[in-house]
Image: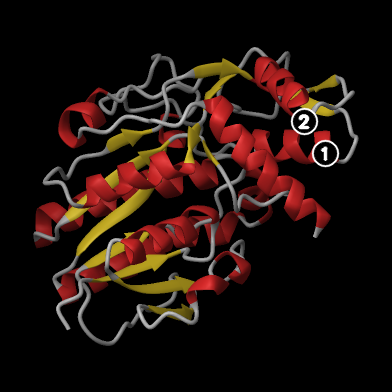
Amino acid sequence: MNMKRVLITGAAGFLGSHLCDRFIAEGYQVVGMDNLLTGNLKNIEHLFPLKEFEYYHHDVSKFVHVPGKLDYILHFASPASPIDYLKMPIQTLKVGSLGTHNLLGLAKEKKARILVASTSEVYGDPTIHPQPEEYWGNVNPVGPRGVYDEAKRFMESITMAYHNFHGVETRIIRIFNTYGPRMRLDDGRALPAFMSQALTGQDLTVFGDGSQTRSFCYVSDLVDGIYRLLLSDYHLPVNIGNPSEITLKEFAEEIIALTNSKQKIIYQPLPKDDPKQRKPDITKAKELLGWEPKVDRKEGLKITYEYFKKALNK
């Protein structure tokens, strides 16, 4: 009866499902919630037999009710890849605004601590490198990516308002590029795109000249950062990501080498407002949480490659 109870929204998604696993492993009662807009029940089907896990099929943009006590809420529901949020712009805006509002209301009612999943995209196409939490960003609110960037910026604002005005215990994480098993093959982000192209014998598509950079964090490292931030005493945004930066051209070459494929790289025009640089300043995470990534890219990519190979065979 003394088990802590946590609600995880977006539970059937890539990050949400890994969070469910982590919290169950840590001895929590987990309530998973997802409307399966971009999530997949396959990611959490192994949890259904467990008495510590319950699942609600629900869209958090509508009123959210969870009976019983809640100690923590983790809000991870949202389309998160450009393919998804360009296809579903209004749902993306609603889950970041109405969904966050509903969950903050629930946190207030249950006296629960809430952690919201923001993103490095709040920095837009940054003019400061690497990006510290104090940087306010360079975002085009009316560009195609604005639906995701501004939804997350609003999420941070309303979360701070609930913290300051209602005294709700809040935490804000800014997530940088993350990868690992359970990513969707058709996700549209660089890693799944390169992997599925290499595995299906297609040339790898790089947008622009490939000089734009990303920093890739393995999922277990990210989940550990989230867990530590939730249990910390810090309420302002914290970057969690891997500061090891690589150009997309170099990254495509790494995938070709890893998959032992004969494909070449082809170049296409850069999408509008695509960030040219992305690298977290993780000074705060190190100082406040004692956190830094442990899994190096070579090791993480090997595990992810095995997952994608199996997923494609299925």
| Residue 14 quadrant | bottom right
The location of residue 126, given as percent across then percent down, is 45, 20
Q: Could you tell me which secondary element the residue under label 2 belongs to? A: helix
Q: Is residue 62 visible?
A: yes
In this view of the protein, which residue sits in the foreground, 274 or 301?
301
Q: Earlier in the sequence, mark 1 or mark 2?
A: 1
Q: Residue at x 42, y 27 (%)?
A: 242
Kind of residue at disc 2: Thr
Q: Is residue 129 above or below residue 117?
A: above
Q: Label 1 neighbourhood size at 10 Å, few (<14), some (14-19), many (20+)?
A: many
Secondary element under disc 1, as helix, strand or loop, is helix
Task: Look at the image and tell me whether residue 98 can be seen.
Answer: no
Could you tell me which residue is drawn at 20 percent across and 49 percent down? 160
Near-viewer residue (46 or 54): 46
Question: Which residue is identified by label 2?
Answer: 259
Q: Amino acid at mark 1?
A: Leu
In the current view of this chain or complex, which residue is farthest to the bottom? 67
